[in-house]
Image (cartoon, grey):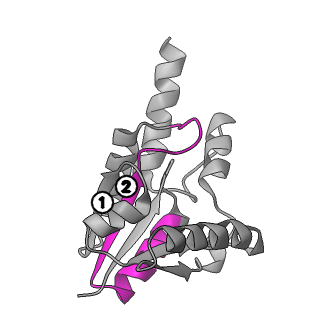
Amino acid sequence: MKKALYPGTFDPITNGHLNIIEKASRIFDEVIVSVAAYTGKQSCFSLQERYELAVESCKNFPNVTVMTFEGLVVQFARSQDCSIMIRGMRAVSDFEYELSLALTNTKLDSGIETLFLVPSLRYMYLSSSMIRQIADLGGDLKDFVPACVVNAFAERANLIKKD
């Protein structure tokens, strides 16, 4: 059985992520979308919220499961008996970071291979950082993220207005 891990912070999950997940789900028998507890930055959504949004967003992919993890992704991959890690690469600007990440993971565990998938052209520019900025400035998110993420930002905005 071919199994792959697609790790990330997914803060929030975007249509670009879903495009990569959809592609991976056609290549592999099982895809584990792995939501990282550690983000290395101030998260917009909690780990539980990011997990729930990912679960809701991936519900139409029967061979995709969503899990959270703490610690090193290579250790989590091993715990799931998975030797393939999926990474999305949008543009040349992603290449250096993604390559260094892949090489570091290989150094940590030489049995884990990284497979880069490129999103469809309409998602090449999309990032979670951009989504957070659009949301902060009150922009329309419906073309960039699943409906559950649009709703999560709307609920958050309503809570802020009430305070």
Left or right placement of residue 6 versus residue 87 in this view = left
Identified at 51% across, 74% down, the residue is: 106
Instruction: Identify the secondary structure beneath mark 2.
Output: helix
What residue would you read off at disc 1?
66
What residue would you read off at disc 2?
54
Residue 22 falls inside the magenta stretch = yes
Identified at 57% across, 43% down, the residue is: 40
Identified at 38% across, 71% down, the residue is: 5
Calculate the distance from the C-alpha at mark 2 to the C-alpha at mark 1.
Answer: 7 Å
Residue 29 falls inside the magenta stretch = yes
Q: Please state the horizontal and vertical placement of residue 134, each as a whole percent of the image.
A: 67, 44
Of the numbered discs 2 and 1, the one sitting upstream in the chain is 2
Q: Which of 108/98 is in front?
A: 108
Which residue sits furthest top?
163
Identified at 43% across, 39% down, the residue is: 152
Give the label on residue 82, or none.
Answer: none
Q: Please state the horizontal and vertical placement of residue 144, each as a whole percent of the image.
A: 57, 58
Asked whether disc 2 touches disc 1, contact meaning CB atoms under 8 Å apart, the reply is: yes
Q: Please state the horizontal and vertical placement of residue 13, each as a whole percent of the image.
A: 48, 55
Q: Please state the horizontal and vertical placement of residue 29, each as a whole percent of the image.
A: 27, 84
Amino acid bearing label 2 = Ala
Amino acid bearing label 1 = Val
- Please rate how many residues cluster around mark 1, counting C-alpha atoms within 10 Å: few if below 14, some from 14 to 19, many from 20: many
**Magenta stretch in the rendered image:** 17-44
Q: Which of 155/99 is in front?
A: 99
